[in-house]
């Protein structure tokens, strides 16, 4: 199962909104074939593993390990539970049930109906941690939220309005880490003030992976729609004024404009995870409403005399690491 998880993680930047899944086939206590879900829309892990199984090995004599319950419905690919049934391994070992209501035990039920020996719940916590974003979307109908910001050693995260001093805080050595975070989330969210002040691109440049969907919160449509952000790739703009669409942005009117409803709407669009890179007001709002799942803070050794203070998550970090001039701190709500 540990090998399944290693394989599954290889699809980290390409599988969303599907989960990360690895599959290992064992014959006489030796691994004889492996596979993983490589990209959204492509063959699932079980298919790839069986495709890699040598023709001279009888699948009836094999054990199959997979970190997530095989799917039981026709989507972009046929159901993997039916593949397992057809291959008739002597045993299948599954890390965890699929939280997707389209599966949710039906894959296990289908396999058990055929008399195949089945074991469920192996390294279940590790399996859940790997696909925490997928699980959150399907169990809470809300996008998984990661807060991220950089702050000085004395707690400032932005310059005062009108300042001509450099606003750079985190070490450029950590640009790769920040952009991997972006690639590891389906969406990236900021507020109108960040758009108008910083004119960001919100794309992936210093790492491999796909660009996230850009999301802007602009209740009164104060975001400058001529900014760099709106000149390539579509941006979702949540507001209280109007709904309309153009080549590079979609205005989404919410009568009940709230962070909770925005996260629900993102899931309805098959967006399961969002990285919050907004300013202190938006970050503080997510913290105050307890709508965050993890936070990553890049704490610089540099000090400013003044500026805008960063928010505080209210708990101690559970992990820290030093990279260049920064201490990277990781938090999860209690």
Image (spheres, grey):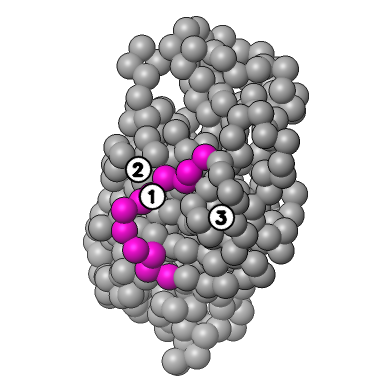
Name the secondary structure under disc 3: loop
Residue 31 shows in the view: yes
Q: Dividing the picture into quarters, in which one does residue 55 lie? A: bottom right
Badge 1 local density, few (<14 within 10 Å), some, or many (20+)?
few
Question: Looking at the image, which residue is at 40% across and 54% down?
Answer: 294
Marks 1 and 2: CB-CB under 8 Å?
A: yes
Residue pushed farthest front?
Answer: 305
Relative horizontal placement of residue 225, taking residue 284 as reference (left or right): right
The quadrant of the image that shows the N terminus is bottom left
**Image coords of residue 48 (percent x, y):** 58, 65
The residue that label 1 is drawn on is 312
Question: In this rendering, which labeled residue sits more in front, label 1 or label 2?
Answer: 1
Question: Looking at the image, which residue is at 59% across and 35% down?
Answer: 160
Q: Which mark is residue 152?
A: 3
Question: Looking at the image, which residue is at 56% across and 14% down?
Answer: 222
Distance between mark 3 and mark 1 Cα atoms: 13 Å
The residue that label 2 is drawn on is 287
**Vertical comparison of 294 with 24: above or below:** above
Q: Which mark is residue 57?
A: none
The quadrant of the image that shows the C terminus is bottom left
Relative horizontal placement of residue 238, taking residue 126 as reference (left or right): right
């Amino acid at each position: 199962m540990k090998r399944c998880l290693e394989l599954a993680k290889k699809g980290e930047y390409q599988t969303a909104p599907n989960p990360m899944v690895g599959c290992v086939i064992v014959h006489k206590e030796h691994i004889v074939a492996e596979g993983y879900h490589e990209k959204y829309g492509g063959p699932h892990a079980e298919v790839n593993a069986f495709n890699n199984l040598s023709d001279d090995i009888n699948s009836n004599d094999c054990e199959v390990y997979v970190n997530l319950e095989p799917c039981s419905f026709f989507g972009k690919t046929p159901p993997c539970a039916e593949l397992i049934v057809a291959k008739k391994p002597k045993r299948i070992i599954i890390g965890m049930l699929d939280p997707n209501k389209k599966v949710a035990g039906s894959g296990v039920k289908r396999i058990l109906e055929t008399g195949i020996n089945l074991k469920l719940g192996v390294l279940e916590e590790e399996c859940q941690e790997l696909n925490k974003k997928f699980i959150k979307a399907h169990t809470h109908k809300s996008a998984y939220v990661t807060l991220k910001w950089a702050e000085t050693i004395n707690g400032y995260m932005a310059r005062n309005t009108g300042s001509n001093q450099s606003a750079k805080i985190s070490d450029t050595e950590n640009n790769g880490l920040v952009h991997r975070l972006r690639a590891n989330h389906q969406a990236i969210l900021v507020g109108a003030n960040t758009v108008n002040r910083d004119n960001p691109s919100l794309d992936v440049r210093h790492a491999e992976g796909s660009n996230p969907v850009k999301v802007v919160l602009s209740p009164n449509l104060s975001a400058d729609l001529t900014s760099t952000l709106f000149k390539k790739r579509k941006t979702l703009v949540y507001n209280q004024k109007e709904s309309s669409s153009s080549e590079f942005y979609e205005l989404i009117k919410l009568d009940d404009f709230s962070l909770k409803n925005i996260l629900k709407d993102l899931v309805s669009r098959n967006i399961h995870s969002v990285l919050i890179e907004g300013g202190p007001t938006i970050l503080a709002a997510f913290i105050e409403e307890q709508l965050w799942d993890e936070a990553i803070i890049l704490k610089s050794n540099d000090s400013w005399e003044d500026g805008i203070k960063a928010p505080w998550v209210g708990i101690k970090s559970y992990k820290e690491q030093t990279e260049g001039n920064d201490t990277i701190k990781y938090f999860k709500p209690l």
